[in-house]
Amino acid sequence: MAKKKTIRSIPQERTPMREQEPQVRAKNFEEVACGYSLEDALRESERCLMCPDEPCISGCPVGINIPGFIQKIGEKNLRGAYDILTDTNLLPSICGRVCPQENQCEGVCTVGDSLEAVAIGRLERFVGDTALKEGWVNIPYIEPNRYRVGIVGSGPAGMACAADMAKSGCDVTVYEAFHEPGGVLKYGIPDFRLPNTVIDAEINNLKKFGVKFECNTLVGRLFTIEQMIDEMGFHAVFVGVGAGYPTMLNIPGDSLNGVLSANEMLTRCNLMRGRDFPDFDTPMPIGKRVAVVGAGNTAMDATRVSLRLGSEKVYCVYRRSRTEAPARAEEVHHAEQEGVEFHWLTAPVAVLDDGKGGVRGMRCVRMELGEPDESGRRRPVPVAGSEFDFETDLIIYAIGTNANPIMGQTSKLKLNKWGYIGADENLATSVAGVFAGGDIVTGAATVIEAMGAGRRAARSMKAYLGIRDTGLPYVSSEGAGTLFGIDVRERNFARVRIA
Amino acid sequence: MNANAMSNFEIVAREDFSDVTYLLEVRHPLMSKAAKPGQFVIVMLNEHGERIPLTIADFDSKKGTITLVIQAVGKTTRQMQQECRVGTSLYGMVGPMGIPSPISHAKKVVCVGGGLGVAPIFPQARGFKQAGAYVIAVLGFRNKDLVFWEDKFKDCCDELILCTNDGSAGMKGMITDGIKVAMAGHPDIDEVVAIGPPVMMKACADATRAAKIKTMVSVNPIMVDGTGMCGGCRVKVGDQVKFACVDGPDFDGHLVDFDDLMLRLQRYTKVEKDAHERWSESCRMTKQVGPSALDELARGRAPQKELLELPDPFEDAPGG
């Protein structure tokens, strides 16, 4: 190896990623961040110290071998980097874009102690996108077993679980209620953050693994979880249906036309392509002055979609301060650059009626931060007499979601007191053979946490089914099926037999 | 069960009840077994289509079909009327959605269907009959040309009261007049179930309020996903906000805030009207002059055309 890197010897500045100019991108749905070039990636890979304690790996919910893939980038062996990534994460293009890396791998990066952390997410995305561009797919050699696994929900948890179960040889079917697979990645996250083409490419990869996708299928109502096990021949089922059920504020004027959930707004725009109305039939509510309530990632998406739909003014209203905002720092920053006006420490108290069933404005009250609450964040307290009105004609609530009630209504799965599915540390539910993970267990969280849960559930399902994981080697897509001079199929077969 | 049967939603039968109302029978063996009275589906005509909720009018597990009765009121339902022929397929159909109507142990039930609501009230009337209840059907139409399924109801109900606004079939009067006749003849009605336009259901709920007869209604607000995800279908029921798609669609008619419901149904009236005009214009252009004119239209250079009158979705309300 080359001489040992030190914090002094590496490039000090984090390699910037090219972005569309804020004024330009606020008018289109093209991706904001254009990704790294090979030169960018090589330079950034230089910044990794390859430290022996590898804090980044433990910071990653799926435990990607981060120094490993970065080293391969440095060696210009992108295929090798892709192989390492796909060992643990089958969806690098998605995760590189939507993971909150600052709280995960990059948050614990050693370089980050004195300089800006290594841009792990950007490197991951670079490798994933290169693979999509080059058409690389790591299809493992799969030894089919006799097990059938049903996955309910095709979002990130379901996709991750499906990938692992298919790799271990199960016959996997994924059910999706919408007409297209992808779940929140499709309906929720807008194209300028995560293009639908990327999601479709990753889904196609799963199909190459033999995963079957059945859309237009509302599990629970078309058939129940119990029927899947008892009648349809599934040996195990994973439930990853997400939280989904949007919270309303329950203030006067909530039901006026012109008040909608971010879920509705984003689904109309992203999945139903309401932004291309009338070429697509789904109408899109567009406000002149839009107020988005909340400051999570979904709220940021809603503000930025509104700008792109042509709204003149977009406000973001949040009852706490910027420090407490749950959105990724980068999202808030992007929204700000694009012209979203932030009103921190401001809470809505009423929606004002225009007399015709629509909205003319919102009444808010100023807040100040008091003592920390149970979430550890300082509790916002209204400032007496600080109420004020402002003009808006479209209000979007992005204040979180609750558990979707369909599973509880239609199955014997035990729920916790908030209505989420109860699962133990192995993600097993109260019904034998049924596992659950993602938002429907934890409440609203992130894409990568859902993927991590999907993989954890897969591990438990394999244990439940008695499948021994053998760490199957990949068969390269060119068909060069040898490893250490041994035919991989043979080697793998031997391992299975020994095990 | 064969899950693969879900990828294709073939139309196997069609019947036109009038120039605006039509019936489609769609093949979906799995759903025909799962469906229960009061549930609905979400349909997408094509890849560019919107998702529209339609109440399941009937289901036949032997034939493996789901029956939908549709009124052509907007762009999508008109386009469906034009394009959905036997042998063609829908791009998407998902369901059965919603909580099935509880078929209670009521001994005497009045099933009220107004206009298009006559179709979805049928499985409920049949369900109550099968549960051993004495079933009185009250059906309302604007005139005799719009009447459908009279025989189907006669077969499964103990009494049938047919009302038309102009008296051209059955008794002349509003649907509420029919309910009053039923109430006058039967002092021991346990339950009323009403399906139809909101203004009609509101009138029905008002008609039974004084007598404190339990009255269930089935609401059909604007939806996107139908799985509890968008919140577009929220309705005020008493002092609570409910999502019709997963908490309903059946609610206590005496508690539903119908004015709120009707207001929310008008959310997209303007854009939908525009979309429909654009669509019917393009249909006319294709028929008359071919695709080049379509291109013109797509580029927004089409000449201004006269406004098309869209029927008011509440118009077909024999009550109110």
Image: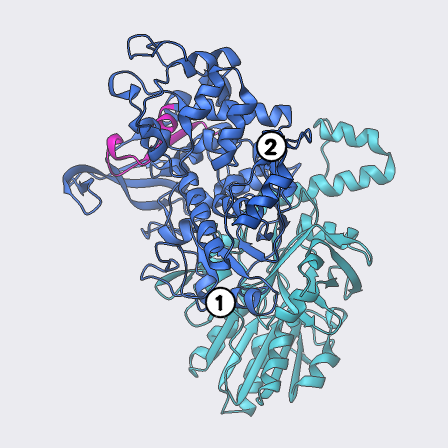
Chain colours: A blue, B cyan
User: With A419 as the anchor, is B35 left or right in this view?
Assistant: right
Quarter of the rendering containing residue B279? top right
Q: Give the extent of the magenta segment.
A: A311-333
**Residue A326 lies within the magenta run:** yes
Rendering coords of residue A250 (x, y %): 33, 53
Marker count (numbered) = 2
- For image coordinates 70% across by 46% down, the residue present is B46
- For image coordinates 50% across by 20% down, the residue present is A35
Instruction: Please indicate, yes or no, whether residue A272 appears anywhere in the rendered image.
Output: no
Looking at the image, is B165 positioned above or below residue A24? below
Quarter of the rendering containing residue A383? top left
The kind of residue tagged 2 is Thr
Looking at the image, is A346 positioned above or below residue B106? above
Rendering coords of residue A413 (x, y %): 43, 65
Chain of the residue on which disc 2 is drawn: A
Instruction: Please indicate, yes or no, whether residue B164 appears anywhere in the rendered image.
Output: yes
Marks 2/1 same chain: yes
Residue in the foreground of this view, choosing between A148 and B22:
A148
The kind of residue tagged 1 is Thr
- Name the residue that disc number 2 marks: A197
User: With B217 as the anchor, is A373 left or right in this view?
Assistant: left
Label 1 SS = helix
Rendering coords of residue A376 (x, y %): 19, 42
For the N terminus of chain B, the image quarter is: bottom right
Residue in the foreground of this view, choosing between B2 and B279:
B2
Residue in the foreground of this view, choosing between B129 and B97:
B97
Q: Residues within 10 Å of mark 2 (few under 14, many from 20)?
A: few
Rendering coords of residue B179 (x, y %): 56, 81
Q: Earlier in the sequence, mark 2 or mark 1?
A: 2
Chain of the residue on which disc 1 is drawn: A
- Name the residue that disc number 1 marks: A410
